[in-house]
Amino acid sequence: MDWLKIISALFLVGMMIMIYPSLKHASENAPKGTKEDWLSAIKPLLMVVVFVIALIVLVQ
């Protein structure tokens, strides 16, 4: 491995260590989603999946 890859890997690990406490705090104090919240998030995702599948079928 060259030095640039080693330094980049060390930098990446350091950033993950620095960000972890903030991520832990945010996940513990985040509001919990209700059933309606999850449904409103899943509907657009399903629409995109159906659209992509339709495009794939039309191309074949």
Image (cartoon, helix red, strand yellow):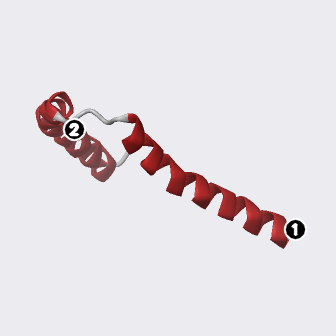
Residue 21: x %, y % from top left? 12, 31
Residue 49: x %, y % from top left? 63, 56
Q: What element does badge 1 sit on?
A: loop
| Dot 1 amino acid type | Gln
Residue 42: x %, y % from top left? 50, 47
Q: What element does badge 2 sit on?
A: helix
Residue 35 image label = none
Q: Report which quarter residue 57 is drawn in.
A: bottom right
Which residue matches tag 2? 16
Q: In 3D space, how far apart are the residues under numbered discs 1 and 2 (Cα atoms)?
A: 43 Å
Residue 35: x %, y % from top left? 41, 35
Mark 1 vs mark 2: which is more N-terminal?
2
Q: Nearer the viewer, mark 1 or mark 2?
A: 1
List the single residue furthest toward the bottom: 59
| Dot 2 amino acid type | Met
Image height of 45 relative to 35, above or below: below
The N terminus is located in which quarter?
Answer: top left
Q: Report which quarter residue 25 is drawn in.
A: top left
Along the line of sight, which residue is nearer the eye, 13 or 26?
Answer: 26
Residue 60 image label = 1
Along the line of sight, which residue is nearer the eye, 35 or 53?
Answer: 35
Query: Residue at (12%, 37%) from the top-left corner?
Result: 22
Query: Residue at (29%, 42%) from the top-left corner?
Result: 9
